[in-house]
Amino acid sequence: MVLKLVGAPVSTCTRRVATVLVEKKVPFEFIPIDMSKGEHKAASFVSNQPFGQVPYIDDDGFILYESRAIGRYLCDKYPDQGAKLVPALNDVKGRALFEQAASNEYQNFDPLAYRACFEMIFKKRRGLTPDPAVFEQLITALAAKLEAYEIILGKQKYLAGDEITLADLFHIPYATTLALAGTDIMSKQGPNVTRWYKELSERPSWVAVKDGVQSMSSY
Ligand SMILES: N[C@@H](CCC(=O)N[C@@H](CS)C(=O)NCC(=O)O)C(=O)O
């Protein structure tokens, strides 16, 4: 049975998963959830995603949520299909460097990037008033983190080495949404971050889903 991706077409986390599905060339059926109607809080949804957040996948009855966990699952299930994205299990050092880079995304990049996007974009959707001063503080803090990225990416092509991994791809949804929030931080931090961000934002898997996820029946 074809894998089902249950999510919202332009949610950042749903598009994170869809990007990996496209990278791994996994056909999927997209089941859209209308968050404006609160469908993600309905009992039928919460029975599969107890936090009432999109997305989750239904892989022939196997239910999994958390976008990054889904990405890892897809790479483990389809190691020889599509882009590799995660070092092999027996590549102990490669695996450790991948997890180091993935932690950077989750701990150093995502909290600040998410809050900056929340301040200028998501607040408006909820009828709240953005605070540009808070946004600027967050962007200043994020710029300090990106100074470390500039050093890392000056020594290697990607965050975990010279091969692209999930750790790079996981950044794309919020890195690109930052531009919509009104900052060019990803393009002016330094030549290495600029080069890395440009490549990620133009990656075909992201281009295929960035304007809204749709089912993919074949590749
Ligand atoms: N850590 C979760 C976060 C999921 C998440 O926050 N999803 C957002 C949309 S991108 C959501 O459903 N927000 C609604 C809510 O939290 O009530 C993941 O990576 O899947």
Image (spheres, rainbow, N blue to C red):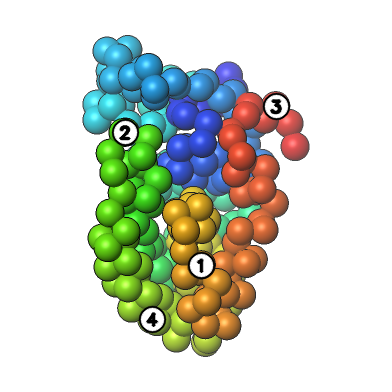
Foreground: 209 or 162? 209
Q: Nearer the viewer, mark 2 or mark 3?
A: 2
Visible in this render: residue 178?
yes
Measure the C-alpha gap from mark 3 to mark 1.
35 Å
Circles 4, 3 touching at the beta carbon (< 8 Å): no
Q: Is residue 51 left or right of residue 14?
A: left
* Image quadrant assignment for residue 145: bottom left
SS for dot 4: helix
Instruction: Calculate the distance from the C-alpha at mark 2 to the C-alpha at mark 4.
Output: 34 Å
Labels 2 and 4: the sequence-earlier one: 2
Mark 2–mark 1 CB contact (< 8 Å): no
Write down the residue under mark 4: 148
Q: Which residue is mark 1?
A: 184
Residue matched to label 3: 217
Question: Which is more N-terminal, label 1 or label 3?
Answer: 1
- Relative to 170, does residue 215 appear above or below in the rendering? above
Q: Amino acid at mark 1?
A: Asp
| Cβ atoms at labels 2 and 3 below 8 Å apart | no
Tell me which amino acid carries mark 4: Ala
Residue 113 falls in which quadrant of the image? bottom left
